[in-house]
Image (tube, grey):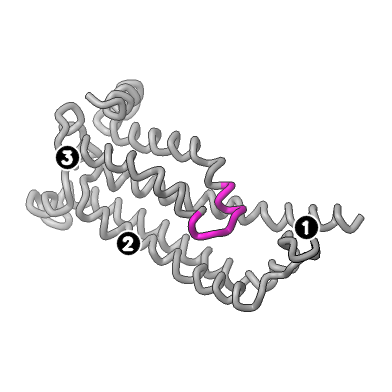
Amino acid sequence: MSVFTHLVAELGRLLEPVLAESATAAAIVLFTLLVRLALFPLGRAAFRASTPVAGCLPVLLQLPVFFLMYRSFSSGDELLDHRLFAAPLGGRWAEALEQGGLFGAQGLVFLGLFAAIAVVAAWSAVRGRRAAAAAPAVAPVMPRVKGAGGAPAAPSAEQLAAMRRLGGVLPLLSFGTLITAAVVPLAAGLYLLTTTAWSVAERAWLQRRSPRTAVGATAGAAA
């Protein structure tokens, strides 16, 4: 049994008196939150760096966890019989459709998962478009990069345009999670939902704090 399987199983046992059959599903969500909490300093540093490469690093570091999740609920033995309500955590949407159709007991669990992922993706898209539209207004109060001779260098028009384009397109990629969740085991879908929701909430929190920090730093420099 892998370390991941052992940790999820132990968390599930702790939650079982309260959540019964859905304890392992809750353990997956809790485990995902713990992973993201551990990666939070890296995510904050990537946000401050504001580069695509830095932003991809937290995602890349999660891939081994997702792979373990997929393997544990695809070919493992100990966790395959656990459920989220009526649906087995190792089951896929195609299997749920075969069991009872789109609105069967298992199908409804997957529909609930897809609806939650769609809400998170829509939230991400809306926030991304707002951030992209506000980029020109925020740029004057953001800390400027030192140019030649130590003089502050403002972002160029091309850089601001690129930021707006990326801000409008990248959030839409969250909707791709729906496609992935439709073909992976339910447990992996829960992981995707939790980590995507964390990413959107984390970025919203960092964006909310960033203008305040930048304004404070600018005021301090002017004083």
Tell me the quadrant of the picture where the C terminus can be found: bottom right
Taking the image as shown, residue 24 lies to the left or right of residue 204, namely left
Q: Label 2: which residue? A: 176
Tell me if I can see residue 17 in this picture.
no
Tell me the quadrant of the picture where the N terminus can be found: top left
Q: Main secondary structure of the magenta part?
A: helix
Q: Residue at position x 69%, y 67% from top?
A: 138
The crowding category of the residue bearing disc 1, from other C-alpha atoms within 10 Å (few below 14, some 14 to 19, many at least 20), is: some
Q: Residue furthest front?
A: 149
Of the numbered discs in the image, which one, if any, rests on residue 215?
1
Q: Residue at position x 26%, y 60% from top?
A: 179
Circle 2 — which element?
helix
Q: Residue at position x 74%, y 65% from top?
A: 147
Residue 132 place in picture, x, y as percent:
57, 70
Q: Amino acid at mark 1?
A: Val
Q: Amino acid at mark 3?
A: Ser
Of the numbered discs in the image, which one, if any, rests on residue 74?
3
Residue 149 place in picture, x, y as percent:
80, 64
- Frontmost residue, 222 versus 14: 222
Q: Amino acid at mark 2?
A: Gly
